[in-house]
């Protein structure tokens, strides 16, 4: 059964009218994950775009068709730990326990509980949709924001020119917790993404599974909404967001890219990068190349 | 505000939905002649407005389509056109 058949035949468990922006990557990720996971699922969504768009009926106008919890920004993984433990003890290990958190709730605020749950190898699938910032409060910088990005806390002005630091590469950090499964995925490579959600769900029955998904954001990054998938594809092709996975057999690169697209091509047309200098682009390029070389050596 | 089919932890009135179709400025229109039934539009639609039958016939529903234009952009055969809403066809 190909991934298109999976997506076509599956029931959509998300409310049809949801207040996510036009062309939202997060909404696509939420719907795809729940189509693959099915109804035997409990999901925890910390504050962020997907919670703010109203998956729990925030304004009594929206919702999911499965049980959904909004924990705090910083306790998603520990909240789901309790839920997962309870379901194991009640003899229901078949229930999919999923977290769908933004990069802020994963890499910044929620990092300590995530790290602890990963180290204890709790049985859940933790999915991070990485839109590189706190989007639902107006795009503040996060630790996964790309260098040079214009955000509301790192504006472009006479003192600084966008974010000054390189992004933190979270998936490798989580994979070093000896988790059951860890992977990166992009909605532009949908076959790979669907397969990784399926693998992650299978691995979450044995231990901790982590999926880091690239999520383009038209509103925060300032580009036309129809370009969303093209942006995600360019991020993969330019090696800014390499696709790899770590399972029981070790690390594998899923998209070997010998001739990456130059970073000048990726930043073109994205409003948050419009003030980048040549040095900024070169420094993003160097960071992406170093990261890709490291991954090549790890994946061997 | 009437249906009570689903269970959510809060809000015992059930689930209501937003009229996201009213956001639409451009309407995607599929040219069935050009369609090769690959299903890319269905895979990439963030709103699940593109549906498919078991015979792999794909069609667009307009009840909740936000008009983002991803389907038209990603269609490998350019079989989907974005036409202005309420204007000339």
Image (cartoon, coloured by chain):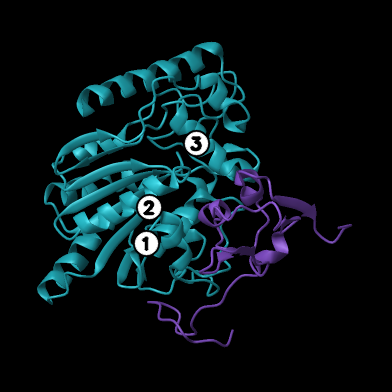
Q: CA distance from mark 2 to mark 1?
A: 7 Å
Task: Answer yes or no: are tags 3 and 1 on the same subunit.
Answer: yes
Secondary structure under tag 1 reads: helix
Q: Residue at x 76, y 55 (%)?
A: B25
Q: Residue at x 33, y 23 (%)?
A: A292
Regarding residue A217, the answer to whether it shows in the image is yes
Q: Colour of chain B?
A: purple
Chain of the residue under the numbered disc 1 shown in the image: A
Residue A21 location, x and y as percent? 59, 53
Are discs 2 and 1 less than 8 Å apart at CB?
Answer: yes
Q: Which chain is cyan?
A: A
Q: Upstream in the sequence, badge 2 or badge 1?
A: 1
Compared with A222, A258 (above or below) is above
Which residue has dot 2 on it? A194
Residue A71 falls in image quadrant:
bottom left
Which residue has dot 1 on it? A36
Chain of the residue under the numbered disc 2 shown in the image: A
Task: Answer yes or no: are tags 3 and 2 on the same subunit.
Answer: yes
Secondary structure under tag 3 reads: helix
Task: Answer yes or no: are tags 2 and 1 on the same subunit.
Answer: yes
What is the quadrant of the N terminus of chain A in the image? bottom left
């Amino acid at each position: 059964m190909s991934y298109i058949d999976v997506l076509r035949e599956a029931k959509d468990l998300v409310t049809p009218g949801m207040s996510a922006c036009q062309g939202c990557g997060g909404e696509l990720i939420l719907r795809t994950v729940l189509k693959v996971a099915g109804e035997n699922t409990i999901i925890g969504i910390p504050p962020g775009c997907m919670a703010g768009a109203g998956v729990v009926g925030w304004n009594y106008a929206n919702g999911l068709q499965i049980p959904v919890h909004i924990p705090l920004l910083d306790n998603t993984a520990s909240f789901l730990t309790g839920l997962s433990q309870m379901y194991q003890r009640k003899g229901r290990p078949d229930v999919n326990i999923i977290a769908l958190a933004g990069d802020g709730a994963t890499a910044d605020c929620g990092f300590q509980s995530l790290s602890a749950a990963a180290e204890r190898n709790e049985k859940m699938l933790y999915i991070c949709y990485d839109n590189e910032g706190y989007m639902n409060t107006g795009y503040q910088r996060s630790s996964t924001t790309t260098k040079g990005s214009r955000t509301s806390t790192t504006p472009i002005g006479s003192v600084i020119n966008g974010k000054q630091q390189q992004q933190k590469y979270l998936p490798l950090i989580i994979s070093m917790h000896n988790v059951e499964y860890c992977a990166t995925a992009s909605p532009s490579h949908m076959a790979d993404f669907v397969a990784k959600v399926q693998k992650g769900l299978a691995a979450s029955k044995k231990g901790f599974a982590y999926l880091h998904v690239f999520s383009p954001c038209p509103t925060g990054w300032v580009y036309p909404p129809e370009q969303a998938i093209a942006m995600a594809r360019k991020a993969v092709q330019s090696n800014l967001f390499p696709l790899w996975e770590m399972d029981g057999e070790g690390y594998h690169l899923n998209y070997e890219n010998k001739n990456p697209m130059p970073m000048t091509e990726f930043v073109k047309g994205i409003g948050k990068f419009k003030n980048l200098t040549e040095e900024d682009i070169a420094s993003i390029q160097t960071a992406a190349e170093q990261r890709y070389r490291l991954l090549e050596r790890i994946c061997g | 505000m009437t249906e009570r089919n689903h269970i959510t932890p809060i809000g015992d009135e059930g689930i209501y939905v937003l009229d996201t179709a009213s956001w639409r400025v451009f309407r995607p229109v599929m040219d069935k002649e050009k369609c090769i039934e690959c299903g890319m539009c269905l895979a990439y639609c963030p709103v699940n407005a593109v549906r498919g039958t078991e015979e792999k016939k794909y069609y667009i529903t307009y009840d909740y389509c936000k008009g983002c234009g991803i389907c038209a952009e990603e269609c490998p055969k350019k079989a989907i056109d974005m036409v202005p809403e309420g204007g000339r066809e």
